[in-house]
Amino acid sequence: MSDDVRADVDGDVEPGYEGVRDAFAHNFAVGREIGAAFCLHVEGRKVVDLWGGVFDRKGTRPYGQDTLQLVFSTTKGATAACANLLAQRGDLDLSAPVATYWPEFAANGKEDIPVLWLLTHQAGLPVLDRTLTAEEVQSWSPMIDALAEQEPVWEPGTAHGYHAVTYGYLVGEVVRRVTGRSLGTFFAEEFARPLGLEFFIGLPEALEERVSPIVGSLIPEGGTGEGMPADFARTLLARALNAGGAFGDSGFPNSRAWHAAEVPAANGITNATSLSRFYAGLIGTVDGGPAQPLLSAAQVEEARTVHTSGPDQVFLSLGFSLEQPIGQGFWRSSPFSPFGGDGSFGHGGAGGSYGFADPENQLGVGYVMNKMSSGMLGDPRSRRLIKACYGAIGVEPKYF
């Protein structure tokens, strides 16, 4: 790596992890990044903490250690952790019908759907028949009412399909009914505060100026991208991503209204350091954090136990068969989400962000960026970074 490339990257790397810095710098050198950050914890210790590039396309200021970033579906990992913590405490029975906690949900043949199927995307509720405005989606109750009356699009439990936006409302409403707290509040009090995270589902206005704007979109102008059919807008995935028609405005990810709302499947705002620390704190202890991991070893095993098989029905609408193994709300490592270790679990987000834990190798990993990738089958940036991490610890990553 040349010195001018290295100048774009700041942060700290412990001896032995220099290859991760090189991989991070390479992503900028080949033009794949505008602004980004990456962090790695090993056995609860932060060994890599990097950031680089610029805050926005105009280059108004550097992408700094204090920059915050919208991470889209990487938020789902935080939401899954909330449900798993309640299960660990005995406050939530994942085998019980959702209607036990949310009686209105029983309408239109949903009375027997267990909570687990919300976490595993098996409930058959990835889309809404009701048309909602962005304001309704962001105000919570209209989405909850729409989901309560929605009829499943497949027989629940017989298949799974990505609940891109509805996942957060479904799981979040169960958490709210059990605890009396919104998902964003519960996560802040039970995870972010104990671990000292800057990870928000519902961003305080005072922090808005620190949020780096998203550049680009998951679907490029014209509606097609790598692996995308020309009629993408009419597919089940497009409908799932659009939440009842609310997100026709491509500028919504950078709006204050979107950042302020609680959309627990899609609008978490954080940084790489907090993402990495979050996953490290799920499976072990971290400096300055709780004396015990937030999830017990037994709950971690349950959280990452795969409950799905066969093709994802939502992605099947794109014309290809995707088999993404899903645990209790978390993705498991797979060719689609190559987290490195075979037992790794976490979640990725639109455009390329991700966070995951690898219990066998005691890793917590976080990556955020402002430049969206348009591919649906992996991202060269993240693959390069993960491969470098496993190279540093002398382990051959899977799916690479």
Image (tube, rainbow, N blue to C red):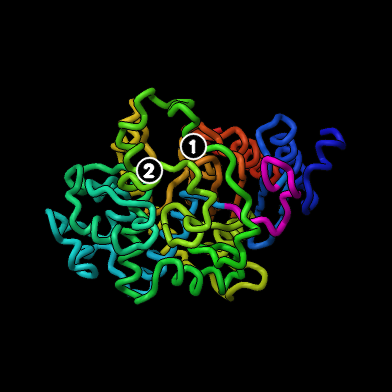
- Which residue range is magenta in the image? 55-69
| Position above or below: 349 against 98 | above
| Residue type of the residue flagged with mark 2 | Leu
Judge the density around disc 2: few (<14), some (14-19), many (≥20) Cα neighbours within 10 Å: many
Q: Which mark is residue 218?
A: 1
State whether the magenta stretch is mostly helix, strand or loop. Answer: loop
Q: Residue furthest top?
A: 230
Q: Is residue 166 visible?
A: yes
Q: Quadrant of residue 302?
A: bottom left
Q: Is residue 21 magenta?
A: no
Q: Residue at x 52, y 32 (%)?
A: 374
Q: Earlier in the sequence, mark 1 or mark 2?
A: 1
Q: Residue at x 50, y 31 (%)?
A: 220
Q: CA distance from mark 1 to mark 2?
A: 10 Å
| Position above or below: 357 against 333 | below
Q: Is residue 352 left or right of residue 125?
A: right
Q: Residue furthest right?
A: 3
Residue 30, given in percent of the width and then of the height, sits at 71, 29
Q: Is residue 124 visible?
A: no
The secondary structure type at the circle numbered 2 is helix
Residue 172, given in percent of the width and then of the height, sits at 36, 63
- Whether tag 1 and tag 2 are in contact, CB under 8 A, the answer is yes
Residue 246, given in percent of the width and then of the height, sits at 36, 47
Q: Is residue 62 magenta?
A: yes
* Residue 213 or residue 178, whichever sits in front: 213
The secondary structure type at the circle numbered 1 is loop
Q: Which mark is residue 241?
A: 2
